[in-house]
Image: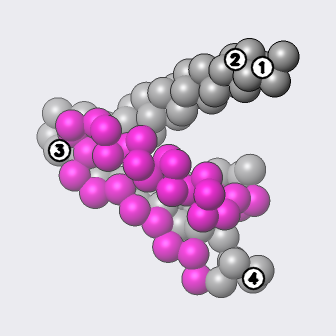
């Protein structure tokens, strides 16, 4: 995965996410919506073979989009650890 900042304003961040597809972007988008300060979280993927997702995050004045993104990534990381632990228990 390669992240690139395409544009950034006070409460708005637009990222390119090379090497990812709908699967990852949907998880991240859903997790961003869990943040009460996130007002917009979405992405576009022009063509699954020739392009890469572009994600837009907008927050209110009480939060920074980079911080909201970081918190969402940490929550996803925690959920994935929990999923892995449960899978290990289930297949024993």
Q: Residue 3 at x, y = what percent?
A: 64, 51
Judging by the rendered image, the residue that carries numbered circle 3 is 60
Q: Which residues are magenta?
A: 17-46
Judging by the rendered image, the residue that carries numbered circle 1 is 88
For label 4, the crowd category at 10 Å Cα-Cα, with few meaning under 14, some 14 to 19 and many 20 or more, is few
Does 36 appear in magenta? yes
Q: Earlier in the sequence, mark 2 or mark 4?
A: 4
Task: Identify the residue at horizontal 55%, vertical 56% (top origin).
Answer: 25
Nearest the eye: 84 or 34: 84
73 with respect to 59 (left or right): right
Q: Earlier in the sequence, mark 3 or mark 2?
A: 3
Q: Is residue 8 something one can see in this rendering?
A: no
Judging by the rendered image, the residue that carries numbered circle 4 is 50
6 with respect to 52 (left or right): left
Q: Give the foreground label among 4 and 1.
A: 1
The image shows residue 13, relative to residue 31, as above or below, that is below
Task: Identify the residue at horizontal 61%, vertical 52% (top origin).
Answer: 24
Does 12 appear in magenta? no
Judging by the rendered image, the residue that carries numbered circle 2 is 85
Q: CA distance from mark 4 to mark 1?
A: 36 Å
Asked whether disc 4 touches disc 3, contact meaning CB atoms under 8 Å apart, the reply is: no
Q: CA distance from mark 3 to mark 1?
A: 40 Å
The image shows residue 35, relative to residue 11, as above or below, that is above
- Toward which corner of the image does residue 76 lie, by quadrant? top right
Q: CA distance from mark 4 to mark 3?
A: 33 Å
Q: Earlier in the sequence, mark 4 or mark 3?
A: 4
Asked whether disc 2 touches disc 1, contact meaning CB atoms under 8 Å apart, the reply is: yes
């Amino acid at each position: 995965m390669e992240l690139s900042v395409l544009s950034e304003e006070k409460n708005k961040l637009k990222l390119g996410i090379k090497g990812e597809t709908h699967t990852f972007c949907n998880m991240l988008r859903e997790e961003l919506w869990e943040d009460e300060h996130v007002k917009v979280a979405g992405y576009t993927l022009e063509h699954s073979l020739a392009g890469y997702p572009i994600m837009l995050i907008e927050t209110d004045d009480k939060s920074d989009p980079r911080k909201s993104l970081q918190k969402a990534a940490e929550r996803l990381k925690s959920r994935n650890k929990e999923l892995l632990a449960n899978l290990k228990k289930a297949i024993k």
